[in-house]
Image (spheres, rainbow, N blue to C red):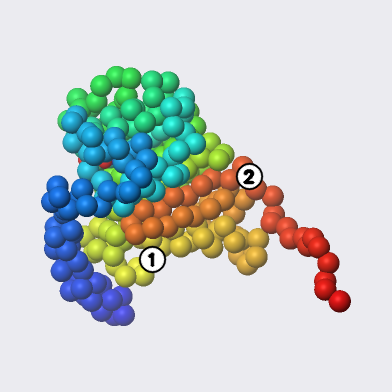
Amino acid sequence: MRNLIAKAIDVVLSKPRGDIYKEMRLTPEGAEARRSASPGPIEELFFANQGRLVHKWIHYLPVYDRVLAPYHQKPITMLEIGVSKGGSLELWRKFFGPDATIYGIDIDPACAKRVDPPNQVRIGSQGDPAFLRKVLAETGPPDIILDDGSHISSHQRISFEVLFPALKPGGLYMIEDLHTAYWPRWEGGYRRAGTGIELVKALIDDMHGWHHGRGARFAGREWVQSVEIHDSIAVITKGAPLPAPGHFSTGHTPE
Ligand SMILES: C[S@@+](CC[C@H](N)C(=O)[O-])C[C@H]1O[C@@H](n2cnc3c(N)ncnc32)[C@H](O)[C@@H]1O
């Protein structure tokens, strides 16, 4: 009964939020006005894009620029869930350079025609663990995984559970558009168990597993090095694995 009431409240409250998503679409002038004062290369590439369509919330761009800076023009392996018109894979190619290995996953077979080699697309659902494992067998351990796919809670969870363990130690796992965690049509609801936002909160608990001793819900505590959360985008860094945290003092106590 309680769940039903909570769900009904979510439906009522999130309906206008869904409309707000449309209202939040910026005009070209509005997008321009939000450009950073000193944009990084990803933000520059996004605004200069004359190629295939790429669709991003503007505030993600400086986040990418900061967390991906160490990978600029490096021979990394990236896996992006959600290809759509192919523009984001094109942008990543320009940013990471010719020696990077870049794969996209999409459920829509039309996406296979929307990329140029050496970028590659595999068609299947991010909610299908067998498909994801097949893709991993081809890519090997990725350095960077970006989930910009269906944004459905169970899909985000399944993808994380299958892909995060395969990420290289030190690698990054990013989840976009986490606002769907509040929208019933995406299996969301305010503080509803199982959403992408609740996954991220659980990872924060997992990271602190040393201190509460309850074990990890998603990833081994020694593997979650950091969880960075902004509006609708999370960047999870995989550890090396990490030793238990330890503390120490230097200096002396004043008399
Ligand atoms: C938000 S768009 C991706 C946008 C693209 N990354 C960009 O930045 O321009 C989401 C994509 O996810 C795909 N998608 C939807 N459900 C999926 C699923 N279950 N598995 C994989 N891809 C899915 C859609 O076909 C769509 O192309």
Q: Position of residue 11 (x, y in %)?
A: 20, 70
Q: What secondary structure is found at the residue carrying circle 1?
A: loop
Please name the residue shown 37% across and 40% down the image.
40
Residue 186 appears in which quarter of the rendering?
A: bottom left
User: Residue at horizontal 65%, vertical 65%?
Assistant: 211
Type of amino acid under label 2: Pro
Query: Picture quarter containing residue 24?
Result: bottom left
Q: Is residue 148 visible?
A: yes
Quarter of the image for the N terminus: give it. bottom left
Q: Position of residue 36 (x, y in %)?
A: 32, 49
The answer to whether the residues at label 2 and label 1 have Cβ atoms under 8 Å apart is: no
Tell whether circle 2 marks a residue whose Cβ is less than 8 angstroms from ligand 1: no
Kindly identify the residue that appears in the image at 36 percent across and 70 percent down: 191
Q: Of the numbered discs in the image, which one, if any, rests on residue 117?
A: none
Front tag of 2 and 1: 2
- 134 vs 150, left or right, is right
Q: Residue at x 44, y 50 (%)?
A: 235
Q: Nearer the viewer, residue 246 or 155?
A: 246
Of mark 2 and mark 1, the one earlier in the sequence is: 1
**Image location (x, y in percent) of residue 138:** 42, 25
Q: Which residue has dot 2 on it?
A: 241
Task: Kindly give the residue lying farthest to the front in the view shown.
Answer: 37
Q: Nearer the viewer, residue 52 or 145?
A: 52
Left or right: 175, with 220 as reference point: left
Q: Is residue 128 visible?
A: no
Q: Residue beneath label 1, please?
A: 193
What count of labels does the image hold? 2
